[in-house]
Amino acid sequence: MKKLLIIKQGNNKDTDIYIKTILRKSKTNNCKTFILDIENFDKNIIKIDRLIKISNGIIVAQPFKLEEEKKIYKKILMNLTKDIDNFTGFSPYLNCTLEAIIQMLKRYNINIKSKKVTVIGRHLGKIIGDYFENKNATVTICHSKTKNLTEHTSMSDIVICCTGKKILTKNMVNESSLIIDVGGDLDGYFKNKIFTFKEIAERNIGNIFLHLS
C-alpha cells in the first residue's frame, strides 16, 4: 500500500475541502494518507522527519506562514522523488494542477502558441505562467492586488485564475476568451468556454495518485 503525506498549517476552508477529497479518493486507490499540521514546526520535527521517511509522496497544501513554508521547502528539497506536486520546482514530476490544465488543453485541442494569456495568482500562477511562456504564449502575471486588472484580462485570449477568491466577473473578459478557473475565482455567470474549478480539481487529484503509482 502506498503512503501519502499531506502537510498543512492550521485551518483553511478550501484547503480542508481539498484534503477531504484526497482522503476519499485514497480509499479507492489503495493508499494510506497521513495529514500533518505543522502549526508548531520545531516542536514536531521528529514526527515530520518520520512521516517524510515512510511516505511515498508528499503534498504541501497551501497556505503557509512564510517561515514554516521555508522550513518545509528545505525538507522536501532533500526528498525530491517524493515531491509529487512539484512544490519545490525541482521535482521530476509536473505540478498536478498544471498537468490537469495541460490534459484539458489537449482534450479540447487548444493551441496556446502566440496567445495572450493573463494569469491571476502568485505561487501557483507563476508555475502555470512559466509553462505557457515556454510554449510561446505571451504571458502577463497578475495577482489579487493588481491595479486595473481588467485592462489585462479584457485583452487576453486565455485568463487563468488561481487566487482562491471571487475575483473575476463577466465584464472583465471578452466572451471569446478561454477561462481556466483553478481557484474557484469566478463570480457570476459567464458565456465563455470555461475549464471549471471542479474539472481541474478532479484531474489534479487523479494526477496525485498517478504520480504515486
Image (cartoon, grey):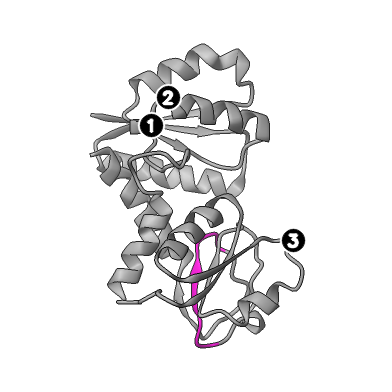
Residue 125 sits in quarter: bottom right
- Residue 37 appears in the rendering: no
Decide: marks 2, 1 in contact (CB < 8 A)?
yes
Q: CA distance from mark 3 to mark 1?
A: 33 Å
Q: Is residue 57 left or right of residue 130?
A: left
Category of crowding for the residue at label 3, using alpha-carbon neighbours closer than 10 angstroms: few (below 14), some (14–19), many (at least 20): few
Q: Secondary structure at mark 1?
A: helix
Q: CA distance from mark 2 to mark 3?
A: 34 Å
SS majority, magenta: loop
Q: CA distance from mark 2 to mark 1?
A: 6 Å
The amino acid beneath tag 2 is: Met
The amino acid beneath tag 3 is: Lys
The amino acid beneath tag 1 is: Leu
Furthest residue in direction right, as rendered: 147
Q: Nearer the viewer, mark 3 or mark 1?
A: 1
- Extent of the magenta region: 175-184
- Of the 4 image quadrants, the one containing the N terminus is top left
The tag earlier along the polypeptide, 2 or 3, is 2
Q: Nearer the viewer, mark 2 or mark 3?
A: 2
The tag earlier along the polypeptide, 3 or 1, is 1
- Residue behind mark 3: 145
Label at residue 37: none
Q: Is residue 200 left or right of residue 71?
A: left
- Residue behind mark 2: 78
Between 67 and 77, which is closer to the camera in this rendering? 77
Residue shown at the point (39%, 26%) measured from the top left:
79
Residue shown at the point (37%, 59%) measured from the top left:
100
- Residue 191: x, y in percent? 52, 86
Residue 211 sits in quarter: top left
- Residue behind mark 1: 80
- Residue 101: x, y in percent? 39, 63
Q: Is residue 45 left or right of residue 3?
A: right
